[in-house]
Image (spheres, rainbow, N blue to C red):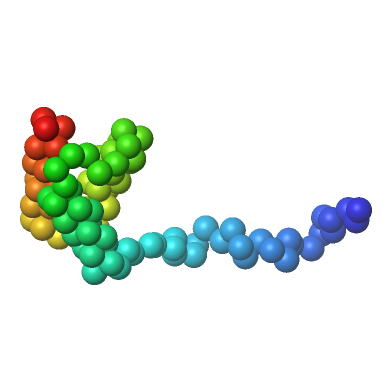
Amino acid sequence: MRQPDLFNPDPQGALFDEQRAPVVYRADAEKVRRQLLEVLALVEKATSLPWSREKLRYHQTVFPQMSRWLPEEEAAQLRFAFDAELKRLLAA
């Protein structure tokens, strides 16, 4: 193993440049919308829970998080519809 040169700057130092703008991820709103509508359509058609309890908890967590990539009014409507369908299915 070679000891690093203490007098030359690290050649990989630019990888950690604090001046560089951070990378920002932007989800594809159309893809998110399509996925949320697929899940919503599934629960709307269902007469009983279409998932195991574990998968239900997953969707209860992920659905609201994914909706944040959409305009707020649309996201709120989708979350409301999803919650209403889950309440219906859990009561059945």
**Position above or below: 68 against 32:** above
Is residue 61 visible in this depiction of the protein? Answer: no
Using the image as rendered, state which of residue 20 and residue 38 is in the foreground.
38
**Whole-percent x, y for residue 42 in the image:** 20, 53
Closer to the camera in the image, 70 or 53: 53
In the visual, does 69 lie left or right of 45? right
Count the marks: how many? 0
Q: Which residue is drawn at 90% across and 56% down?
A: 2
**Residue drawn where x is 8% and y is 55% of the image:** 73
**Residue 57's spot in the image, x, y percent?**
30, 36
The residue lying furthest to the top in this view is: 91
- Seen from the viewer's position, the closer of residues 74 and 83 is 83
Residue 72 in the figure: left or right of residue 18: left
Residue, x 33% and y 64% (percent of image)?
26
Residue furthest to the right:
1
Where does the image place residue 71, in percent across and percent down from the top left?
A: 15, 60
Residue 60 visible in rendering: yes
**Residue at position x 28%, y 67% from top?**
31
Q: Nearer the viewer, residue 18 or 30?
A: 30
Q: Left or right: where does residue 1 sit relative to residue 53?
A: right
Residue 84: image quadrant is top left
79 w.r.t. 5: above or below: above
In the rendered image, the vertical position of residue 87 relative to residue 81, given as above or below = above
Residue that sits furthest to the front in the current view? 47
- Quadrant (top left/top right/bottom left/bottom right) for the C terminus: top left
Q: Where is residue 51 in the image (x, y as percent from the top left)?
A: 29, 41
